Image (cartoon, rainbow, N blue to C red):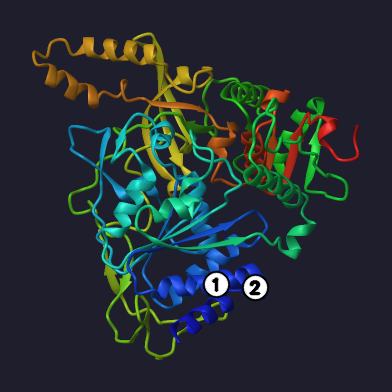
Amino acid sequence: MIQEELTRRIRASFGFVPTADQERAITLFADFVTDTDPQVAMVLRGSAGTGKTSLASAIVRALTALQQKMVLLAPTGRAAKVFSLYAGHPAYTIHRRIYRQKTAGDLSAFNLNENLHTNTLFLVDEASMVSHGVGTVQQRGTADFGSGDLLDDLIHYIYNGAGCRLLLIGDAAQLPPVGEEEAPALSGGLLRGYGLRVYETDLSEVLRQSQTSGVLWNATVVRRMVEQVRHGGWQGADGDAGVSVLLPRLQLKGFTDITVVPGDELIESLAGSYSRVGIDETIVVTRSNKRANIYNRGIRNTVLDREEELTRGDQLMVVKNNYSLIPKPSSKEKGADPLTYPLSTGGVRGADPLTYPPPTGGIMGADGLTYPPPTGGVRGGLDDRETPTFLANGDRCVVQRVRGEEALYGFRFAEATLVFPDYDDYELTCKVLLDTLTAEAPALTHEQQEQLFAGVMADYADLALRADRVKALKSDPYYNALQIKYGYAVTCHKAQGGQWAHVYIDQGYMTDDMLTPDYLHWLYTALTRATEKVFLVNWPKKQVEGEE
């Protein structure tokens, strides 16, 4: 009875007839949600064009109508924003949700938070980015987040809450986390190692409307190559066994949403994209930080005609975690539940964890569902607008004002007012480090960090106790200046989890030793960042069908 009602609600939220894969996933999800075993999890894998996003949003709408408690999570701020937009429900970053600072004195150390939710379904989108083991430290920086294992901490956090369970949603063909060969969070076998009973389902049938898209058509071709390598093994170019990686040949003929851009037309093409869809909806994806730096300099100087090093409107990306610039929340807000739960108004209790509201009328939504009338609720300590607890490597921001450039300790600083679009346009005025904008290194090198440390500490030499000097250092605006780079061109790992209308892909010069499974993951991930059109920059003819 409960399963039938839930599946009916999800189907009604679709607005079209589900595919056979989606139908199986809906049935399996209903079994998962109503399973009385508290140690259950579900993995929903789906590639681009298979309707994974539509299914996830239909699930969220159906559970909202049934007043089921949910928390939506994603690995990055951009991914959380995308998840929130298509699901129509607030979404949060995993790190900001499951960790809390250990002490006020140690701003770079985070403990696993206490899960105060009960009977709540946690949905994690872009789960292919969730790392296991050393990958977490490599991705997030040197800070101590819980155990240092993001997947391990996520599972422990969720299942420490009474009646809570986890749905992981992702695409196994995308780039896995740094240091991993495959996405661990999408592995049912690995999850069973935690003592969980795992429901697994895959969406592989490409929707009919997706077949008219050149981006999705080519992404599907590359995805099948990824699967072939995964199932057949890979030994490398000189290996005697396994499946060798073939050079993907992309189909452009007959499609209007994917095209090759020669180098001599790139400036004009980028300018056209900025004019048509906006700078914030255009991105260049490269294979290296060095290549991204070249693009960023060229775009600012040639396309945007910006002479100042940093100016209003500049798109930036944070390149090193910063734990000092965001004001700490009050004790009342710590660990507080940001969701609004309906007041107890009666209803029919399902087997667990669904509660069906009594039939007392409601509001008819655009999707055809009847939603319970608003009856008030109990709000936790935080607003639905997310305020970051720290600034993470990869967070995006836009410059509003720049002033007060100065040189100290062998580095150059400026005071800038920044807006973070992935966090509800959170505004912050702080010192920024100008040296990292065009440096080839991803952030300050170890030697440069030591130089800055020594210079700032010398300013506090009058403090007798080292503990007092360290305390002053942690609040020093120059030592804690935000390390930034331009964000017009980024590596594929930095782009992962985000979507842009126009995506320019530059793979650079390809050699045989670069033709690896990682390259296929890279190309697939880059292609699937686009919502409207892909531009292949200087793409070699041997990688285009029908060209020689």
Labels in figure, total:
2
Q: Is residue 429 visible?
A: yes
**Local secondary structure at mark 2:** loop
The CA span between labels 2 and 1 is 9 Å
User: Which quarter shows the N terminus?
Assistant: bottom left
Report the side of 45 relative to 330 (left or right). right
- Nearer to us in this view, 199 or 355: 199
Q: Earlier in the sequence, mark 2 or mark 1?
A: 2
Residue position marked by numbered label 2 in the rendering: 18
Mark 2 and mark 1 in contact? Answer it, CB < 8 Å: yes
**x%, y% of residue 478?**
32, 20
Which residue is at 49% across, 44% downward? Answer: 129
What amino acid does circle 1 point to?
Ile
User: Which quarter shows the C terminus?
Assistant: top right
**Local secondary structure at mark 1:** helix
Which residue is at 78% across, 44% downward? Answer: 258
What amino acid does circle 2 point to?
Pro
Residue position marked by numbered label 1 in the rendering: 26
- Nearer to us in this view, 17 or 370: 17
- Nearer to us in this view, 245 or 424: 245
